[in-house]
Image: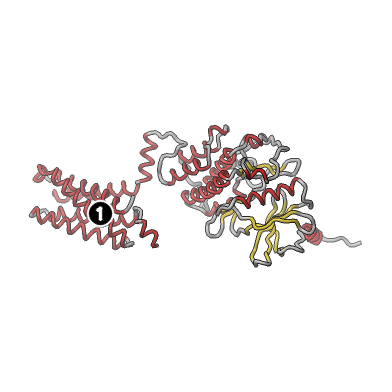
Amino acid sequence: MKFLSDKALERLRTGADEPDLLGTRYRLLERVARGGMGVVYAAEDQKLERRVALKVLDVPGTDGDLANRLIREARVLARLEHPGIVPVHDVGTLADGRVFYTMKFVEGQRLDKFIATVESLHDRLRLFSRVCDAAAFAHARGVLHRDLKPANIMVGPFGEVLVMDWGLAKILHGEVAESAAPADHEVTIYEKPKKPNDGNSDTTSSVITGHGTVMGTPGYMSPEQARGEIEALDARSDIFSLGALLRFILTQRTPSGLNPHLDRSLEAICAKACAEQPGSRYSTVQEFGLDISRYLDGQAVGALRESILDKFGRFYRRYRFFILLILAYLVMRVLLVLFLKR
Amino acid sequence: MNKILLGLLLGALLGAIDGGTAWFTPAVRAQIAGIVVGSSLKGLIAGVAAGIFARKVNSVPLGILFGLAVGCVLAFLVAYMQHGYYFEIILPGSIVGMIVGFATQRFGAPSTTAAAAR
């Protein structure tokens, strides 16, 4: 009796899992990643002759919870037309009954990989600001992401930042909610959030409930989200995730092995965004982003009550060049006076 | 802060410091106030000129040269009117011009029209 080799078995399993794209305009190219609900493939849109990302459910059927979630994710994305949010192109059902949608194929690196290549603190903060812009836009449209983390952010080859994986998005209010699937009610998560950089936390995998529904990532989800208080979630829950993301961005080591210097203002911003109580956090992402902009401009941040020394230090950092220039000029002038006196 | 305002402020400040050092020369200590005002004015004019130049020409070496030239000419005029102290007035005045020439090239926001044209 002859057995199949492990390799051959694996090939058969992969082949069986591959979506059947017959009858669609897409041609399968390769598997890219696995998400909470399904698999993302690279595919070719044969009509438009372009590469797209095709997200397809693991299980067939269009009326199940997962199918509803995937369709809802596509609808949410379709409403969020923003340079920082990956655009959706198409949604449908495959011949094998699995729901899929296609979106822009983003070539680039995930933020958790990319960030180590960014040496400058200011560049890291600018990158983060672009994530804030996308999140602020979504909030303005009544959509919470609920799974903001480095693995869900892509940085393109031209530095463009795209927020991905809106599978956990919650629609907050207004006319958007009418056409969307019902909000999640079934999920309760008791895992206590960990700090993103405590060495033990998994920064890439999301928590999956017994129903197989992704609800957040420890270390990045807010305490109220971790407690399963779904109805209580608002923009401040995403602000917590953004705060954890900011801390991750700021504390990742550079290729030279050094941690970027994290001063008191940035510490205060992270602490305010990640406050245990939602009421102690920034109330909007714009407010959060404004504090980052203030920091980048060398201004006082709202999260920190400055002492005189802090103010002096900030003034010095902001005008260091001119202060040193004037001091150098003064020294030169004094030397000249002493020289002429001799 | 735009380049002209930057040149104006830095030129005036360095000019005032420049004039203030006249206090170390006992012979002119009595006229210190006039010297400080005059020197500030000189620095201010050099700074504004360097700022305008920086808006038109985007080159650090040319900016430094332009600042040096303006500072030197203005300082020479002042020294000529003083009938003396050529070295004491022209050397620091020229250095002030160089510094504001450099600073206006490296720092300060370009004019909106220049930025749009780029």
In this image, A238 relative to A27: left or right? left
Residue A290, image x, y percentages:
47, 43
In this image, A318 relative to B95: left or right? right
- Residue type for callout 1: Val
Residue B103 visible to the viewer: no
- The mark total stands at 1
Residue A200, image x, y percentages:
63, 41
Residue that carries the numbered disc 1 in the rendered image: B48
Quadrant of res A7: bottom right
Kindly identify the residue that appears in the image at 49 percent across and 40 percent down: A287
Residue A121 visible to the viewer: yes
The structure's colour scheme is: secondary structure
In this image, B33 relative to A312: left or right? left
User: Does dot 1 land on a helix, a strand or a loop?
Assistant: helix
| Quadrant of the frame with the N terminus of chain A | bottom right
In this image, A101 relative to A119: left or right? right
Front residue of this view, candidates B27 and A82: A82
Q: Residue reaching furthest right? A: A1
